[in-house]
Image: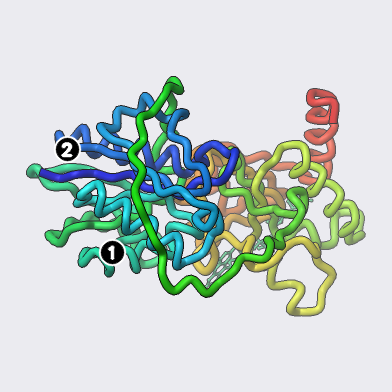
Amino acid sequence: METILFLSPTEAGSPLSKNALEALATAKQLAEALGATFSVGLWGDAPNADAIASCGAAKFYAVTGAEFAQPRYATDAAAAEALARAAGATMIIGPSGSRWNRISAGVAHRLGGRADGHVTGLSVSDGAPKIARWYYRQRMEGILSRIQRPWVLAVESGIAPAWQGAPGTAAVEAVACTPTGVRSKVSGIESQAADQQTIRPDAELLFVTGAGWTKKQPDGQVKIAEAEKLILGFLRIARASLGSTKSLVDLSGEGQSTLPFLTHMNQVGQTGSTPRHAKGLSTCCHGEEPHTVGWRFIGERRAISLDANCGWARGKADVLYVADAFAVMEKVNALLAQKTGA
Ligand SMILES: Cc1cc2nc3c(=O)[nH]c(=O)nc-3n(C[C@H](O)[C@H](O)[C@H](O)COP(=O)(O)OP(=O)(O)OC[C@H]3O[C@@H](n4cnc5c(N)ncnc54)[C@H](O)[C@@H]3O)c2cc1C
């Protein structure tokens, strides 16, 4: 019989991330489908399982210590290994993210198991657990199983609703762990200010900008400053994630006037990313196949384009507004500001 272990690092004073709660829900569902034992393992300087006490886990395990607070391979991998051994886990499920993705293969190796990343679904057939993964730039979905155990999985965000339930008091079993070979010391974290960070995987909405924002408009003018103001203004109020077409992010390389906050990290499509958001709004973009293939996992799709015959119009968007995105977004921003008081 399988023993399923949900594993996650914790950060002092913070609840588990949405991504971790989604992975927890996925692990719990799999355990129920298999009739398997289900446990939870956490590590950090003060891991607390009270918020997820009612998740149905038979046991909660924790590795605790100041050294486990820092995101670092040696301590994260040692903690995960110790927790997996304590739980006798045959399947270990963690949330995709820099900490778990960095250690999952190493943890599988230490345990003599196998690892798979980018897992987008778990199911059971013929009594055996199966995982879903996408291949060939999200064009083909593969369903696979493995006979080796433990099987260590990194589960993508956005594939299941986050676990929700009443907090309580979890009886946590302490697991001893003495990491070796700790050479790295985290001296601080440098990151963009929250408002400058435009890629937000947890956002409800993906807002995509196309090259049209930088093109001559019907009045013969290029309006880069206005475009920047409208796009950043919308992102600030809507907290949307910013995607872009390839044409737009390529412009800077061609020496043309462009939007400075866009990089190739924002690019969505065949040679870009394939994000997951409940909704998407495309602006000033033609909706060509190499771009829209990156919208595979976007729920409701809308687009604003001047071209009534663009790719979006040919079945790629649920709603196409044939309109000037400058005018539409100005009005949208004004309405949002009115509504939110921002
Ligand atoms: C091998 C390969 C891989 C590729 N990979 C990718 C990829 O990963 N991602 C990607 O995005 N592309 C990719 N492309 C490029 C893709 O085919 C398109 O060229 C690109 O997506 C077009 O970008 P765009 O729609 O922003 O620009 P354009 O085609 O120039 O379209 C601009 C649009 O803006 C509209 N517009 C202008 N002004 C306004 C306004 N005021 N209001 C409303 N609409 C307005 C215009 O009507 C037009 O439809 C790839 C191409 C190849 C060959």
Query: Where is residue 134, by image quadrant?
Result: bottom left
Q: Position of residue 178 (x, y in %)?
A: 39, 61
| Picture disc at residue 140 | none
> Does residue 18 appear to the left or right of 228 in the view shown?
left
Which residue lies under the disc numbered 2? 36
Is residue 118 visible in this depiction of the protein?
Answer: no
| Picture disc at residue 108 | 1
Query: Which corner quadrant holds the C terminus?
Result: top right
Q: Position of residue 239 (x, y in %)?
A: 70, 40
> Does residue 28 appear to the left or right of 33 in the view shown?
right
Q: Which residue is rendered at x = 74% and y = 72% of the image?
A: 251
> Does residue 318 appear to the left or right of 59 in the view shown?
right
Q: Residues within 10 Å of mark 2 (few under 14, many from 20)?
A: some
Check mark 1 vs ligand 1: CB closer than 8 Å? yes or no. no
Indicate the secondary structure of the residue bearing disc 1.
helix
> Does residue 268 appear to the left or right of 207 in the view shown?
left
Q: Position of residue 177 (x, y in %)?
A: 37, 57
Q: Compare marks 1 and 2 and give the one earlier in the sequence.
A: 2
Q: Position of residue 136 (x, y in %)?
A: 36, 67
Query: Where is residue 170, by image quadrant?
Result: top left
Q: Are marks 1 and 2 in contact (CB under 8 Å)?
A: no
